[in-house]
Amino acid sequence: MTNPLVSTIDWQELLARVENDADLAREILSIFQSDAPSYREALRHAVETQNAEEVRKAAHAFKGMLANLSANSASQMAAQLEQLGKTAKTAEMAAAWRDFEDELLRVLRDTEHLLAGASE
Amino acid sequence: MNSILIADDDKLSRRLLQTTLEKAGYQVVAVEDGASAARLLCKPNGPRLALLDWVMPGMDGPSVVRAVRSQREHPYIHIILLTSKQSKEDIIAGLDSGADDYLTKPFHPPELRARLRSGERILMLEEKLVEARETMRFKATHDSLTGLWNRAVIMEILDREITRASRDHSKGVTVILGDVDHFKKVNDNHGHAAGDAVLREVARRMNSAVRSYDAVSRYGGEEFLVVLANCSTQLAVPRAEHIRGLIETRPFDTPSGPLNISMSLGIAGTDDWPGLTGEPLIREADVALYRAKESGRNCAFVARPNGLEPAVPERQKKGPIPA
């Protein structure tokens, strides 16, 4: 299930961490796929309303989920957003959010590739 | 032992944990918030192992730990916090809340299993200690030969029952002090093994003669004390006779063969002796017991404030049984 198009999720690392249970890896990918939109909306709303506490919470949730998926770069970007929320640096949040959202979309696209590859 | 609670508001993380733990043979209870975790962990017979996410809406991991630890008289629960927090201050705060261990997310399954095994070792150690404590508690409260209450405990029971009786307007508390007749001869003629067998069997027969809320104890060498709660002296007399009959009715099996045994008994009740505490009441029963020995043994006497009277009128009495 190695897919040259996938760049944001370290599939081998993910597989190793679930002890080569490919079914479990796919299951958590699809949980992410269905849960991500609402988390994304919550984070977007928090950034737009400059609610630092909500940014911290929503980014924290993303950080954990993305780390579990081995979407390491996206997880780090969520960690940065979480930090901005924690320190209430509202001025920097919008830019960090844009970068994160771009990466998140790539992760979602890769998730789709990986799940599609599984059914082949 | 292998039931485990996991609490995590992130569905993905919960699924990963649950599957990993189920594969390792654990029975998993998964919840998505801290309050549910605290409720389940505080229930009797709940899981003894818990993996709690640190950050959860409402009650976070450390708050759950504090709630669980505030429960006294509850078996120990081994709690591991799951965290993506990495700062030393956070980890110290988590452990200070009462958590036993922590694991950083994303977790590594072999490490998770190893930490749970370490937790299980601690729980097993706790179980052994509790078991040892219970054994010690039994030994401290019971006579080792007969398994009856020991003297210290029966005195506590007696004083407690007397206090309760004065408060509840019950029929009172009556004590029966019984002494095995010619016990020294049993030991001298048949050996201590026979003597021990006699004492054990006396204990068994006396125990079978009382109600569940009465207490029987080995008061001294061959002396036995029965505390009858909510029982007047009048009602205690046939009970003492019943005990006496159970002892004399058939021979005792001992390593030296069957032996005929009898018992003399003294009775005293708080309805006759209002205001007496445990020890003076037993002294009255002891005087009655002494009188029973004097009048030929294998009989019971009642200590009344106006004198001692036989439990059974003279003419109906049987003769003593030689040991």
Image (cartoon, helix red, strand yellow):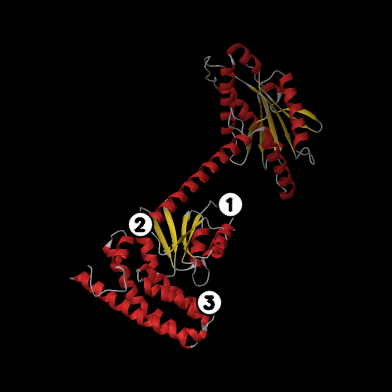
Relative depth, front residue between B170 and A91: A91
What's the CA distance linking mark 3 and mark 1?
40 Å
* Front: mark 2 or 1: 2
- Whether residue A74 sits left or right of residue B196 in the image: it is left
Judge whether A69 appears above or below B176 on screen.
Answer: below
Q: Which residue is mark 3?
A: A86
Judge whether A97 appears above or below A115 on screen.
Answer: below
Judge whether B166 appears above or below B323 on screen.
Answer: below
What's the CA distance linking mark 3 and mark 2?
36 Å
Provide the secondary structure element on which disc 1 rests: loop
Q: Chain of mark 1?
A: B
Classify residue B271 by image quadrant.
top right
For the residues beneath circles 2 and 1, the answer to whether they share a chain is yes
Q: Which residue is mark 2?
A: B22
Q: Chain of mark 3?
A: A
Residue B179 image point, x, y percent: 67, 24
Q: Residue furthest top?
A: B189
* Front: mark 3 or 2: 3
Q: Residues within 10 Å of mark 2 (few under 14, many from 20)?
A: few
- Badge 3 amino acid: Lys
Q: Does residue B318 appear in this view?
A: yes
Residue B117 image point, x, y percent: 43, 50
Q: Residue furthest bottom?
A: A48
Q: Residues within 10 Å of mark 1 (few under 14, many from 20)?
A: few
Residue A42 image point, x, y percent: 43, 82
Judge whether B137 appears above or below B323 on screen.
Answer: below
Q: Does residue B182 appear in this view?
A: no
- Badge 1 amino acid: Glu
Q: How many numbered discs? A: 3
Q: Chain of mark 2?
A: B
